[in-house]
Image (tube, rainbow, N blue to C red):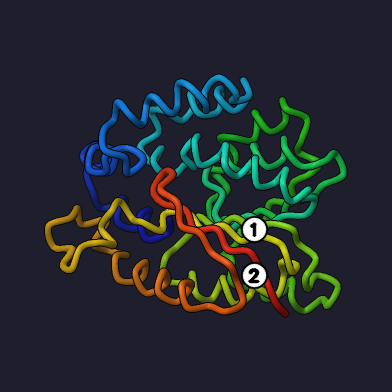
Amino acid sequence: MVEIMKYAAHANLSHVKQKLVSEGPSGLLQSDELYNYGLMTSVYPREAEILKGLRDAIANHPQSYFATAPDGGQFIALLLKLLNAKKTIEVGVFTGYSLLLTALTIPQDGKITAIDVDREAYEIGLPFIKKANVEHKIDFVESQALPILTKLLENQENESSFDFAFVNADRANLKNYHERLLRLVRVGGVIMYDNTLWGGTVALADPSSAHPMRQFAWKDTIEFNKMIAGDPQVDISQVALGDGMTICRRICW
């Protein structure tokens, strides 16, 4: 999301938000009605009230589209439970919807290393994290992600010690994140990447007709998807939740 933030600083944000939401359509499904059907029947009825409160609190934030989609969040929670995840990494936090969801899902003695350059955005969600009594599970690091991931690898005890990683961050560094996370996440663990369908633009031969924000990281997203598809170290599945999610299960050393 770093590239989007850089672009948005020089853009009409209300226009950007409208285009990002309407040019999908929502959830990359055939209609907003179908997307809303899924939300109303299976997502919202099971969404924790504290998560709904955070989602409502940022609804009018000019960059609210940075947040993990609630249907994607529900999928993350399911994976965490299937993995019996206890130790996780989050690269890209924004206001903390997926972070709070993860903290609510993992055990009381679970730990999350959460990395983001924007502490101000994180602090919007912090009251909800505190209210949910899960702050003790979170180690928030205000930093670019690469130095922190590299530092974690300097301690051999961190290698293959994480159960799950979620990446919602800059497209240009996805390959670098992947290389490091493969060493940090255990065999059988999962790395999930958000925004891998990039508003559907990855299917375009020429992105010039897409919104400039989508053009900005179009090539990086396509190159990353190609790299992941050919990586023998992981099983993968790309699903049309939110803006596209790619799930990678580590299968070898």
Confirm or deny contact between disc 2 and disc 1 (CB under 8 A). yes
- Left or right of residue 145, residue 135 in this image: right
In percent of width and height, residue 247 lies at: 55, 58
**Residue positioned 45% across, 51% down in the render:** 239
Mark 2 secondary-structure assignment: helix
Callout 1 amino acid: Ala
In percent of width and height, residue 170 lies at: 44, 63
In percent of width and height, residue 146 lies at: 59, 71
User: Height in image: 40 above or below 70?
Assistant: above
Mark 1 secondary-structure assignment: strand
User: Height in image: 253 above or below 101?
Assistant: below
Characterize the local packing of mark 1: few (<14), some (14-19) or many (20 or more) Cα atoms within 10 angstroms.
Answer: many
Characterize the local packing of mark 2: few (<14), some (14-19) or many (20 or more) Cα atoms within 10 angstroms.
Answer: many
In percent of width and height, residue 3 lies at: 37, 61
Name the residue that disc number 1 marks.
165
Callout 2 amino acid: Leu
- Left or right of residue 38, residue 21 in this image: left
**Residue positioned 76% across, 62% down in the render:** 162
The residue closer to the viewer here, 160 or 117, is 160
- Left or right of residue 136, residue 128 in this image: left
Find residue 125 and report its image quarter.
top right
Q: Quadrant of the N terminus?
A: bottom left
Find residue 64 and report its image quarter.
top left
- Which label's residue is closer to the chain start, 2 or 1? 1
The residue closer to the viewer here, 214 or 182, is 182
- Left or right of residue 178, residue 26 in this image: left
Identity of the residue furthest to the left in this view: 209
Find residue 180 and report its image quarter.
bottom right
Q: Quadrant of the C terminus?
A: bottom right
**Residue positioned 64% across, 40% down in the render:** 77
Name the residue that disc number 2 marks.
181
The residue closer to the viewer here, 90 or 61, is 90
